[in-house]
Image (cartoon, rainbow, N blue to C red):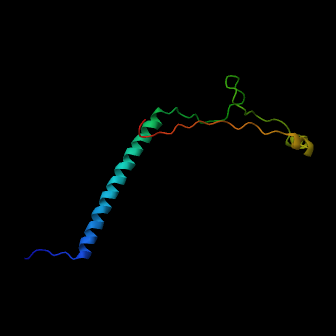
Amino acid sequence: MGPIRLTPAHKMMASAVLVSLVILGGASVTAAAFAARLDKVAQNAPAAKLGPAPTEDPQDPSVVSRVLTDDPEQVGGYWTPERLEDASPMPVPELSINIVTPND
């Protein structure tokens, strides 16, 4: 049997397959490293507590939720067009975000 001769099309296809494998390998390594980094960050993050909102917490002044017992019709009657014009919005809660970078 003689040597295998590759045409330019075969060489280009082999090169494309090789480049694709290298790119996929790099992407999978990057994804695995990123996932491991996210797991590490998630383990260090404080756990969120799920459940009903607290009614009134004197310890935390940022809690603004409470149980409403007022009649909805009375509340709706309170907001006249004049009061709506003079109303001011509640302050927007501030949120701080820590961005994890590879150098951390």
Who's the residue at 24% across and 75% down the image? Answer: 8
> Residue 7's image quarter?
bottom left
Who's the residue at 70% across and 38% down the image? Answer: 92
Camera-side residue of 97 and 57? 97
Camera-side residue of 32 and 18? 18
> Residue 19's image quarter?
bottom left
Camera-side residue of 2 and 103? 103
Image position, residue 16 (x, y; %)? 30, 67
For the image, the number of numbered tags is 0
Q: Is residue 56 left or right of residue 80?
A: left
- Quadrant occupied by the C terminus: top left
Q: Is residue 77 left or right of residue 31?
A: right
Who's the residue at 30% across and 57% down the image? Answer: 22
Image position, residue 12 (x, y; %)? 27, 71
> Residue 64's image quarter?
top right
- Quadrant occupied by the N terminus: bottom left
Camera-side residue of 14 and 53? 14
Q: Is residue 43 left or right of residue 86?
A: left
Image position, residue 49 (x, y; %)? 58, 34
In the rendered image of this protein, does residue 31 appear above or below residue 52?
A: below
Image position, residue 48 (x, y; %)? 56, 35
Q: Is residue 11 left or right of residue 95?
A: left
**Residue at the left extreme of this rendering:** 1
